[in-house]
Structure formats: C-alpha cells, structure tokens
Amino acid sequence: MTLISKNKTSLPYDITKATSIFEYSKSLLGKTLRDFVRDDYEPKKGKGSLGQMVENIFFLLETNNYAGADFSEAGMELKCTPLKKSKQDNYLIKERLVCNMINYCDVVKDDFEHSHFYLKCQLMLLLFYLHQNNCDNLDIEFIFSVLWKLPKKDLLIIRHDYEVIINKIKQGKAHELSEGDTMYLGACRKGQKGDSLMKQPNNPDIDAPRRAFCLKMAYMRTVLDYVVKSGKNAVSNVVGAKSELVCTNALLKKPFDDILLARFNPFLNMPFEKIAKRKKVDISNNPKNKFAMVANAIVSSTKCPNVNRSEEFLKAGLTMKTIRIQTNGIIKEAMSFENIDYIEVAECENWIDSRLYELFSSRFMFVVFKEQTKNKEDYVLEDVFFWTMPQKDLDWAEKYWNHIKDNILANHISEEYWWKGTDKKKFHVRPKAQKAKDLAPTPNGGRAKKYCYWFNNDYVREIIDSRNIERNNG
C-alpha cells in the first residue's frame, strides 16, 4: 500500500525525505489520534485499521492498494507496533512485527532484492504504541518513534532466512513452514485454526496455512532495547555489536549456522577435559555448568561470556543447550527453561501469542556430550546441531500450555496439579528456584512458588534419536 496526498505541498513535512517524516512523527508521541482527528473523520475498523488511521489523521494522507512502501517517494514503510507494560512498569514487545503476506505461488518468482519484503522494509518508520484491551483506536497512546534501517549484517542473515523460506515453498513444503526454520525473518501464521488454506506451488494436493513475513519478537526486543537506551526518538544503528559472534565479512562468505558448526568440527570426538584445556576453561572446581562453559568457549572463541546473550542469539531467540548422554543411552538430565510467568499466561488469549509458543517454536543449538565408560564421567563431544520443534510436538505443547493456564486461572499453582515427568507427555512442570521462599505474583493478587517449564528426559532422547536417524541417512 502506498500513500497519496491530495496536496503534498501543504503537508507539515517533506514526503520525499525519510528524516523529515521521522521528525514530524515525534509530535505524535505522548498523544493519541484524538488530539488530531477531524470531526467528520469516520474511524476505520478491523485488523490494520490503526495504521490506516495514523496515515489519514496524523500524516494527512489518503490510502490506496499499491503494494510498494507506504512512503514510496522516501523509500520508507510505516509500521505501528504494540507494547505492553511489565510488572516492573517497563515496556515490553507484545508481538512480532508483521511485514507482508506471503503469496506462495508468487513469492517464488522473486529473488530477495526484488521481493516485496526487501523493497518495503529495508527502511521503516516504527511507531510504538501502548496496547490496552478494548481501547478505541483514537485513544491509543504512542510512546516511541524510530527510523529503523536494517543493518547490513542483519540483512545478510535475513537474506539467508528468506532463501530458507522460499526454498521450502519451492519444494512444495509450505505447509511445513515454521518460525523456527530461520533466525530474524520468520514466516508467521496468520488467522485462526480452521481458516481457509492457500494453494502452494509444486504440491497441488496439500494446501498451506496463511503466513506472513515477520521480524520475530526476539529481534523486535533488541530494537526496543536500542530505542529505550537511545532515547524516545531514535535513528537505528547496529545493536549489540560488542557481543557479536560473527562479523559481517564472514557472513558474506558463509551462512551463520555453517560458521558456528565449523568451530566445533576440530573438537568432535575429543574428551571434554581436553577441550577445556585447549580452550583455557578452568573446570578445576567442577562447576555445575562446566559443559555449557566449554561449549560456550568453542562457539564464541572467548569473545562472549554467554553466547545466549550474544547479539545474534538475542536477535534470533536462539538458545544453546548442552545434552549429556550416559553409556546406557539415558539422558543425564531433563532440560529446564525459564520460570512460568503466571500473569502472562493468564492474560494471554491465544497460544500462538504466548511466551511459551515463542520459546518452544524458536531455534535451538544442541551440543551433545556422550559418556564413554559407565560412571566414569569421561564424556566426549559427540554432536552439534540446530533443531526446531516439529508441529506435532508443538500441538502437544499447546495442550501443555492450556493445562497450565487452566490451573493458574483456578489458582491451582501446586505440584500436584502440573504434568509430571512420569506422565510421559513430553513436557512437565517442576521448580527450579533455589529457595522455597522465592515466590512470583499470581493473577489473583497473591504470590506462589516459582515453577519452571521442562522437557522430559525421554523427549530429549526422542530428539537425539531423530537426529541420529537423520545422520545415518545423511
């Protein structure tokens, strides 16, 4: 969609210059559209209506259905994106940034540089607003404005993400797309279950759910973090460059995944203690996280103390996890994740918008150590691979989340109500807090013991078994 003014010379900004439009946008901050609306204006309704109203009321422009960037003469897209408030009164990203719908049959015809996404979204004016339930669009308050140009390094990763998505569509696998396939650019579901499906190329027998290109929530968090730290009115720069794992020049030659996996190759089948010595990791005190310390040293080459807090991992929502396999094939430990935010679960209306969906549908890098002699703790580095939870397991995760939500709403926040590891349902809930008095707020105004999301041991074993089959067929 483009924007067309009846009289461009009378506009309070230069429609041909992104910086002029950005400067003008600052006058919307701390205000609502009601402060600018004409008495005769008829409010829009439905999804996407807020953006149209901002165009009409604030920017004094009419809209049409042209598929280019909104401010086409300035080469800039306008995006309005919601924030929410945390318990600590901080601003949080509410949802991924949807960029444009994917037409499976058309998108395969364009390379990245000629795609609608690239032509529209390489430069964006982002207007962050505070989401409030049942709030009239005219009364929504705008909080931040940022002129965001996708950094060159990010574009290299996004270009590869785009190619991953397009290649899957070309293979007739649009119905198997997942946000976990990629790093920054996702193919997110649009609409609800039961909505009409779309035709896809090279697979006339299977239609695919509607999807759109989006910048993932994890990526948008880094944008918001930059805006907050830079001041309310920001022009983009490189985020988190000090903690980068891979430089721009390296990404010009190889994809991010290949670069990281190559760092592990010299250490495959090497004893854990020998790797620690080679990488100068002190494990003399037998720290509990010694396997993660060693894996971290291999990935980061000591540049980043925690790869899960590196620029690329944060932007991608990517998580590195270590797995230990005993000689009998049993996984040493279940896999823990973050504590359950009881209020977030209770207030979230849709599984796909939940924190758990984001967490489980994101990508993982698993680093596998295998014991060689029973009870000798003589582990070697056996394998490293990237993994995304398949849809059939995400369906189980949705049941898991609904069960958690029902119990939270009923104020049944106790171990007796949660799924247990012995239930063999792939996931379970149990504490991870070190202190029993460590409590978290609940929706009814009380406080309850902290509980955590977990993968069952046997589910981790399933993941490893699937990986081994893949390698053997490889």
Image: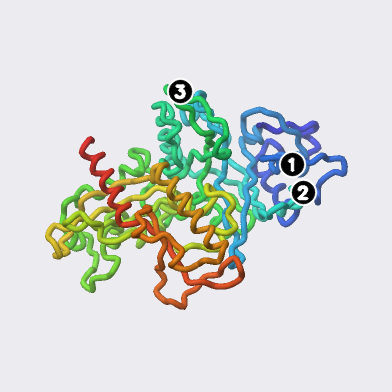
Residue 53's disc is 1
Q: Quadrant of residue 400?
A: bottom left
- Mark 1 and mark 3 residues within 8 Å of each other at the beta carbon: no
Query: Which mark is first along the chain, 3 or 1?
Result: 1
Identify the residue under disc 2.
138
Q: Amino acid at mark 3?
A: Pro
Residue that numbered label 3 is attached to: 201
- Contact, mark 1 vs mark 2 (Cβ under 8 Å): yes
Q: Residue at x 23, y 73 (%)?
A: 285
Colour treatment of the image: rainbow
| Residue 460 left/right relative to 22 | left
Under tag 3, what secondary structure?
A: loop
Determine if residue 138 is in view: yes
Looking at the rendered structure, the secondary structure element under dot 2 is: helix
User: Three-letter amino acid code at disc 2?
Assistant: Leu
The kind of residue on which mark 1 rests is: Met
Question: CA–CA distance between discs 1 and 2?
Answer: 8 Å
Q: Is residue 148 left or right of residue 290?
A: right
